[in-house]
Image (cartoon, grey):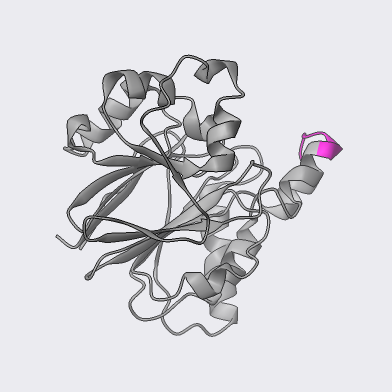
Amino acid sequence: MKLKFCTLASGSEANCSFVEIGGKKLLVDAGLSFKGLVKALEDRQIGPSELDALLLTHEHGDHVKGLPLLLKKLELPVYCTRGTFEGLFKQALFERIPKEPFRMIQGGESFTMGDVIITPLPLSHDGAEPVAYRLDSQEAHCALVTDLGCPGDLAAALQGLDVLLLEANHDRRMLESGPYPYSLKLRIDGDKGHLSNLDAARLLADLTHPGLQAVLLGHMSRTNNYPPLALETVKAFLDSQAVAAVPRLMAAPAREPSEMIAF
């Protein structure tokens, strides 16, 4: 198997993904409780002890709240930027967790894990030093890109993918007319907030190619979005741009594992 990928949860409350690539089994983020993580993995026939490492995108609670107990139960190296590391240990929840498992990485600088090249990609978001991840082996290429207010020059770093998790957080009209306070609406739709459905579609239009097999739209707001609308918006935009190679589009469930993508 060249690649196996699924989200274990992807929404405003919890985010966690599993990737098997180049013989390595990796967890990206730890926003699930340990009990929830174990169940989600075992539902996909994956034992927690099989994991090789944890990659953190940033320090916000929906991506790290399961980390303290996870580190007590499993011996895993944890890779994150210096900003994420420092942001974690400013939170009371992380005062007593060991620092030894953490490995510092730098946005834009690739590192290797066995035969896998891991590239942390800097993002525009209101974390301390957030990143997306691109994972490459000789046979497979995937990326996880959520929690960004604007794509910037990401498209250049995301060419030639087989599988992509891409944020489609909100529908702009729903956000504008919804119940959130005005200040929160500005944050979400700002350059350091979250990617809208239409902005996700625009970025995806620059990434499509015949080899891009599947795209999971994730990190959707339960208040300002819903899966059929996100899928319809992205598909309609790709059609309007006459994109020839439209990949399989799926919506990542907020609270349960997605379909396992494998090839």
Indicate whether 133 appears above or below 236.
Answer: above
Front-most of residues 191 and 261: 191
Residue at point 56% right, 67% down?
A: 154
Identity of the residue drawn at 29% across and 45% down? 26
Residue located at (68% from left, 44% from top): 126
The residue lying furthest to the right in this view is 182
Which residue range is magenta in the image? Answer: 178-183
Left/right placement of residue 190 relative to residue 20 reads right
Residue 124's place in the image compared with 70, above or below, is below
The answer to whether one can see residue 60 in this image is: no
x, y percent for residue 227:
51, 49
Q: Main secondary structure of the magenta part?
A: loop
Q: Report the side of 214 relative to 169 (left or right).
A: left
The residue that appears at 58% across and 69% down in the rendered structure is: 203
Q: Nearer the viewer, residue 37 or 52?
A: 52
Residue 83 picture quarter: top right
- Where does the image place residue 82, in percent across and percent down from the top left? 54, 41
